[in-house]
Image (spheres, grey):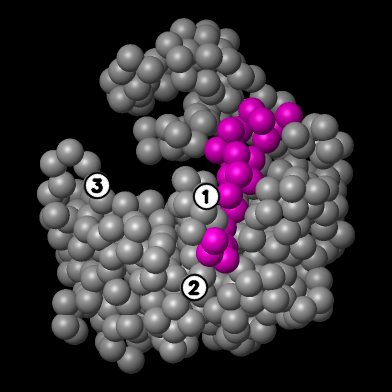
Amino acid sequence: MKISVIEPGGLNIELAILFASKGHDVGYYSEFREAFPAGIREKMGTGFPGVTRFIMISEALEHGDIIICPDTYSQDYLALARKYSKPTWGAGHAERLEQDRLFGKQMFKSLGLPVGKYYHGTGVDELEYCLKHNKDLYIKFPGAFRGTMETKHHYDWQKTKREWWGQLLSDLGPEMDKINWLAEEPVDNVMEVAVDQMNILGIGSLPTLIGIEAKDVAYLGKIFNTVPPILQYTTDALTPFLRSCQAKTFFSPEGFITKDKKFILSDPCLRTGHPVSSVQLKIYGNLCEYMCRAALNNLPEGFLIKPTHTYGIALEIESEALDDSWLEVQFDPKRRKNVHLQCARQDGDAYFVIPKAFLAATIVGLGNTIEAAEKEVHDTLKDFSCEGIHYDLDALNGIKEQMKLGKTVGINF
């Protein structure tokens, strides 16, 4: 089929490549327009076999028999696709659940889901008052300001004032008195965990990954045939909302399991989450068929996604060189399946990541044991290089220690 992958930020090039590898005619569009384009972002997605990089969104919409919008901030793309009468994959208006954090909290309460203690207000004066009178909070802004500050940990006012308060005021500029904010108290928990599924009109895919992330560093997940009851209640509660929004999307509700065995949802991720999507694209043998059938409303009842392995690991590779310049990443061509690229282009046999990208790459390892998945990661790293490389293998050990606690709450990793 003709598939168009349309997104705002360049994080899902590998999804377009995956569809091309399955024989589809793939078009790719990622937003680059501004008053004075530098000609950098428009290069994302170019050079990859089987993928045509479109510069005009109208061309991408015309091209696709199916339009796939895997990332957040894609409501407009999805609306345009539907005006073109194209079958679609995307969260659509369900994105509000993630982007409007106060709306999300209020919905969780209305559904009878447990919600941790939080404060909310408008403007930095109210936020400053909150931070001066409280310690140990996690500060979050609405989705529209995610690039300014997604989540900041406030320990105490003196530390916050010294380390990031001034920069925040500068970044917000004239919006500083208008910004809505949430300040969440930490949850006394046993573990933080996510159900990493695809969700079609409120129904989650099975089997499913359930995993733990070391924030922006690493991920380790295991395939489960069913969702453990402690997590299933939350996903079921959101079914009516997702169905009403006609959402067909990657869905990774993440939260904390408390000592009294309650799951407190903290982040209803309605997109290809990172780094988990790096594993999802590699571990499911029929992901493209599943997504196409879902978009075409041709997903038979009981249709199962087919994992090829039991465990998946994603290790984030950072580079300080990305602050200023294009970055070439090099690896053994035999390990291409283990290297997940974002914001990248291919030039012959060479791979380049654009300046200011948040990652150099993600290394993926799969196996029927954690040890086998780790070996794939280590073997790939042996021949992987780039300037200013940085990664944290120790984070995987921390995740494995958390997983041992899963048995106490009914999750057998």
Residue 168 at x, y percent in the picture: 35, 23
Q: Earlier in the sequence, mark 1 or mark 3?
A: 3
Mark 3, secondary structure of its residue:
loop
Q: Amino acid at mark 3?
A: Arg
Does 36 appear above or below 325?
A: above
The answer to whether the residue labelled 2 contacts the one labelled 3, judged by CB atoms less than 8 Å apart, is no
Residue 180 at x, y percent in the picture: 52, 21
Residue at left 64%, top 20%?
119
Q: Amino acid at mark 1?
A: Ala
On the image, numbered disc 1 is attached to which residue? 79
Residue 300 inside the magenta-drawn segment? no
Report the magenta residues as a range.
85-106
Q: Earlier in the sequence, mark 2 or mark 3?
A: 3
Q: Amino acid at mark 2?
A: Asp
Residue 260 at x, y percent in the picture: 86, 44
On the image, numbered disc 2 is attached to which residue? 65
Q: Nearer the viewer, residue 393 or 287?
A: 287
- Confirm whether residue 60 shows in the render: yes
Residue 91 inside the magenta-drawn segment? yes
Task: Sort mark 2 into few (<14), some (14-19) or many (20+) by Cα contacts within 10 Å.
Answer: some
Q: Nearer the viewer, residue 257 or 343?
A: 343
